[in-house]
Amino acid sequence: MFHEIYRPLLRNVDENLLQTLLKSGLPDVPGIEALILSVALGDAGYHKEPRALAKKIIKKHGSGPTQQALKLKSRKKYESQSAAKSFDADIEELAAIEGFNAPEFAKFIGLRSTAYMRGAYRYFLAKADARQLQWHFKNDFFRKGEYAFINTNYSTLDARAFAALLSSFSDVEFASRVQSLIVFVLDDFTIPPGTFQHAANLHRLDIYAPRLTDFPSALCEIESLESLEISQATLSSLPPELGQLQNLRSLELTETGLTTLPDEIGSLSELSSLELRSNVHLTSLPPSLGRCSKLSKLDLRGSPNIENIPAAILDLPALDEFTRRTIADMYGDTDPATILVREMKTFTDQFDGTLEINVPAVQEALRSFEDTGDVAQANLYELMLAVGKCYVDEEHGQSRFLHEHINKLVPEHVQKANKAISVPLYYTPETSAKVLDLARERISKSGLDGDRFLSFVKPMLGRA
């Protein structure tokens, strides 16, 4: 399938091979002239010699159309942003050369050059005939001894190109080698039953399909599948055959039109991760999900219309505590102030010690809240603002994360106070007294206790 001569020419160009080809001529391999031309005009790293050798090969052994193409664009180097801007016009000029295989040349430029040249690969997908597309999918992505991975996510496939990709799976040798498939399909599509019958080693399948309306039941025939992701699709339901995927460990369905999940999802005995982010039409989860005993991650962010979470799901033994707590906060009746306290403790636990240990004033505030349940009396909002300014993980932006998270749980006047002291992002022992006094004034103007805020901040900064 994949010809060995391609491997040393697609990425880091083997100059010794080019020297050999210059002496002996070009082998009878499909697309070899287009590949050599892509070396001559494309990205060859920091070395000029591969380009020069490739040009000599074309001049000596290339066909008339390829030599004409080289002469027309000999000064081009399709490796930069400026070159990418002119590619659309350039490829049309080359396509006008009788006998020159412009789609094949564009394909190799796109595969072996920088990210700037993705437009070249898109041109190939749009212009190649069915035979070229099938040959491409069955050959260009494979390297002997390497992981079989097909990823066209950086270029959308239309229905014609995707059909060519699917038809390639009828080749038993090809289908058995594919382990991972990631595609972005522009059009709605169907997948015929039996398409993946030979894909015995296909473990991961990601499909981004904004116009997909019906879940392809043929995907449920892939017994080896361990990870399935379908994103940005308009599908509203999943077929009961989904329960057949007995090896599925990860299922991600984000930004879809799903309203519910089939009961058969409870048959996925190996499922450990279920991501259902941004499914605004999803209103319920089936109790059968509680049979997925290995489920440890359940991500429901951006899916606010789920009416309730069955107790069987929250009782799953493998569900991690963070997931359990987040679900309870989002869909349960937990008091916002209680959530606020817990999130502050969780946040500060990432550092040396906890709030209660580090700052006596904090202990007093938390005890007051536990005793009275009165947010104002415990100065809980002032405490939250102080924590957000003084506990900071710069690398992961944790202070900003805390602010954004807690803003969802507080009244508008507290949000305004939080915004009023957003600069600087955090306080350090070197923060000036002038900055702290300004923060106290702004917090006081927002209707909170600025002095109490400073009583929390100063001990956190090691000040009296």
Image (cartoon, rainbow, N blue to C red):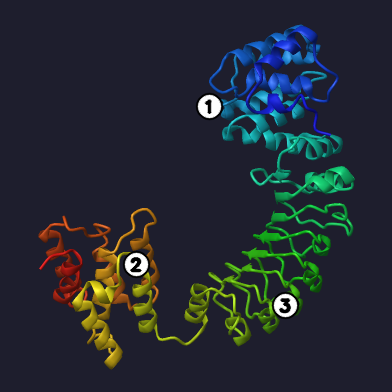
Q: Secondary structure at mark 2?
A: helix
Residues packed near mark 3 inside 10 Å, few (<14), some (14 to 19) or many (20 plus): some
Where does the C terminus fall, quadrant-wise?
A: bottom left
Q: Position of residue 355 (x, y in %)?
A: 28, 73
Residue at numbered disc 1: 82
> Residue 122 or 167: which is nearer the viewer?
167
Residue at 24% across / 75% down in the picture? 382
Sooner in the amino-acid sequence: mark 2 or mark 3: 3
Residue at 73% across / 46% down in the picture? 157
Residue at numbered disc 3: 266
Mark 2 → mark 1, Cα distance in angstroms = 42 Å
Q: Position of residue 121 (x, y in %)?
A: 68, 35
Q: Give the residue type at disc 1.
A: Ser
Sooner in the amino-acid sequence: mark 2 or mark 1: 1
Residue at 67% across / 84% down in the picture? 287
Q: Quarter-wise, where is residue 453 in the image?
A: bottom left
Can residue 252 be seen here? The reply is yes
Sooner in the amino-acid sequence: mark 3 or mark 1: 1
Q: In the displayed orientation, state which residue is furthest to the bottom.
A: 372
Q: Nearer the viewer, mark 2 or mark 1?
A: 2
Where does the N terminus fall, quadrant-wise?
A: top right
Q: Position of residue 238 (x, y in %)?
A: 75, 71
Q: Quarter-wise, where is residue 49 in the image?
A: top right
Q: Secondary structure at mark 3?
A: helix
The label shown at residue 403 is: 2
Q: Nearer the viewer, mark 2 or mark 3?
A: 3
Q: Secondary structure at mark 1?
A: helix
The label shown at residue 383 is: none
Q: In the rendered view, would you say 203 is above or below 171?
A: below
